[in-house]
Amino acid sequence: MLRTIIKIMVIAFAGRRIDALDSEEVRFPLSQVPLIRQRIENKLINLNCNTLICSGACGSDLIALSVARSLDIKRELLLPYSVEIFRRESVTDRPGNWGELFDQIVQELTLNKSITILNFDERDPQTYFKTNEKLVEKAIIISKKQSINYLHNTIGLIVWEGRSYGTNDTTNNFKKVAINQGLIIEEILTI
């Protein structure tokens, strides 16, 4: 008798926001959104993702949350501080109509009790690094509930241009946190 083994993945996710209009560096141009959406969809399918944990900034976070919804993947949203401040600071401050998508996702995940507000201080320069730690921690907790071999079923997925821009790079920090916790890293390139 042939037995099929289905490996179910919990994905901790982080990535680039859309480039600002006055950005000198190209990391994630708005024109790349359709391509990145397709790449994220393919990756979530290929990894057999059943749970996605991420924040909700404009760009890769909101794209991933939207794709996960369309694939009927469980979503967990972690925000470092209040919805209102996060929306202003990390969602609507860049090109594109991200506010409406953010509002829909927050509404859906609030109803599902799948949103966590971490209540960090928005003025603290370490807030996003602390949020990265919580994202990875939550992914591991969820994965432990699903499998004894939880580290084999937990992946850190990042969407970026493939290189760090320095010590304040939150995507690179997420990558380091995930690796330090034993997660395998998968990457999707934005350019």
Image: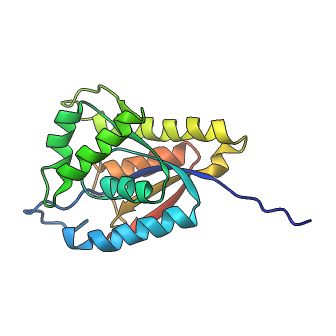
| Residue sitting nearer the eye, 182 or 49 | 49
| Residue sitting nearer the eye, 16 or 64 | 64
Q: Looking at the picture, does residue 58 appear above or below residue 146?
A: below
Specify the quadrant that holds the N terminus.
bottom right
Q: Is residue 102 left or right of residue 70?
A: left
* Display colour scheme: rainbow
Q: Looking at the picture, does residue 191 appear above or below residue 150?
A: below
Q: Residue furthest left?
A: 22
Specify the quadrant that holds the C terminus.
bottom left
| Residue sitting nearer the eye, 9 or 111 | 111
Rendered residue at 33%/58% (across/down): 63
Rendered residue at 55%/56% (across/down): 49
Rendered residue at 47%/59% (across/down): 71
| Residue sitting nearer the eye, 180 or 156 | 156
Q: Which of the 4 image quadrants contains residue 134?
A: top left
Query: So how many labels did they put on this image?
Result: 0
Q: Could you say where residue 96 lies in the image, as x and y percent from the top left?
A: 15, 61
Q: Could you say where residue 129 lies in the image, as x and y percent from the top left?
A: 34, 39
Q: Is residue 120 left or right of residue 158?
A: left
Q: Is residue 93 left or right of residue 119?
A: left
Q: Could you say where residue 115 lies in the image, as x and y percent from the top left?
A: 38, 35
Rendered residue at 71%/58% (across/down): 6
Q: Could you say where residue 111 lies in the image, as x and y percent from the top left?
A: 37, 34
Q: Residue furthest right?
A: 1
